[in-house]
Amino acid sequence: MTSRIQLLRLQLPLVYDLSAIGMTRLQLVYLLVFTATLFACWSPYKYLPYLVPFVALGIVIWMVPYRSILRNLLLLIAIWIGWIGIGALLNPDFIFQNALLAVMTYNSFYIPLVIPARYLAGETLYRCMAKILLVITIIEASIGFIQAIYGYTQKGSFDLENGDFVEGTIDLALAQSPGFETPMFATNMAFSLLAMMPMILVYKKKSWTIPILFGAAVLVLASVVHVLIYLFAAIVVALIIFRPITLKHRRVGLSLLIFGLLIAFLIGLTSVLLPTNLNRVTLQFERAIQLGNPKVILLQRLFTVAPQEYPWLPTMGIGPGQFSSRASLIGSGYYYGGIENPITLPLLKPAVSKSLDLYVLDLWMRILNWPGTAGSTMKPWASWLSIFSEAGAAGVIAVIFVFTGTLWIARKSAKSWSKRVIGFSFGAGVILLFLLGMQENYWETTQAILIGCLSLKQLYANLINLEITTIK
């Protein structure tokens, strides 16, 4: 029996002898999980990405049952039990089905939260992840480009709603989609591009510049204006925080060229291909803050009317999946198919919470009859609104603490130039994730952010635990 095991280990060096490839067993598992995530998030099957984190955690615990991982998992479970328990005690209208849905919809953050960063630090792991990302990015960008060209033949312009054709393999059909496929394409592409940036500057892969610029061009063609605005803002803020461009460094010319080229390319291409959409940015901002905007009305209700019915809402929230979160919307039965043609999911009984009925449904109906196009800027939900309504100020403070604390640790660790470049990519991704929470329930859309979350976790691990030796 022993000889058979030894023979098996000789035949499977990648599983049992990982020192030769510079990765631990956990890092290899993480790479496999990341690869599976790419296929799931770029697939047309909307439910598949929600399964990946749970299956991945099961595999990790089975193959590498480190105490710290088990401890973090138990802590995560305890937080969920506490949040659900407090909501059920305070809210007499609490719906447990929707709370369990929330456990599933927020699962993009489970793997980054459970696996300690020190176990994922490794240049080999990053290089492998980046190479897989490059291949997938080229494939998705090529398909997206073909879809954009087809849209141009139908609309006569790359502007306006032509971006709705650009969906990559999320929807291969050459048809305009009114759903969330294009925003998911845009966020996946944005996070992928940011994650690959260190390969050009730190690891000297100059040949990667053209594929990354091609991906950026197709990202512009997708015409998801809020993603472009948030990405630009994230890049600017990350440049200020991490300062990868410094006159003291001997490679300042290269860094200035790369960053300047990327920013100028994005701005120039957007101005040329999307002039109307770009001119609408001011209009969208005005819509975002006008009193008639359903999202603004919901915000007003959260601070004025809702506390009269739920006095504990401003501090503790009314529990996960009970207000305007994606879990609450899915649990209502109206999310898929709409209010007029609801589609009931298997094993779920439609359950509209009292708070959703009182404060959100009428605004949802208003969106259906909104003059012109009512995009995500007008929809009466967003991740930050969901956190406040369902976890209160306590939840908002906790989330802000996690975002700012992570950035602070990353900035403190970015002492060398190479680490500042990695810090820039990481920081821009974190800030982009932060800003997306203001637009839609992105934090519960696993297909839109899981690639980003796993990429950011590995960048963070290298940033705080690893000496980058490629460039001093």
Image (cartoon, rainbow, N blue to C red):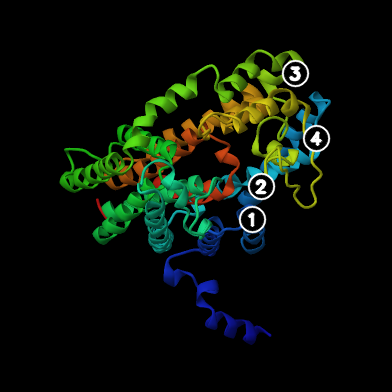
Task: Classify mark 3: helix, strand or loop.
Answer: loop
**Based on the displayed image, in which of its 4 quarters is residue 272 positioned?**
top left
Marks 1/4: CA–CA distance: 27 Å
The CA span between labels 2 and 1 is 9 Å
- Of residues 416 and 226, the one drawn nearer to the viewer in this rendering: 226
- First in sequence: mark 2 or mark 1? 1
Q: Which disc, if any, is residue 95? A: 4
Name the quadrant of the N terminus: bottom right
Q: What residue type is labelled 2?
A: Leu
Q: In percent of the image, x 36 and y 33: which residue is there?
A: 233
Disc 2 crowd, CA 10 A, few/some/many (<14, 14-19, 20+): some
Mark 2 or mark 4, earlier in chain? 2
Q: Name the residue under label 2.
A: 73
Residue for point 27% across, 60% down: 205
Q: Which is more foreground, mark 2 or mark 4? A: 4
Which residue is labeled 1 in the image?
Answer: 57
Q: In this view, does 371 lie above or below 62?
A: above
Which amino acid type is marked by label 1? Leu
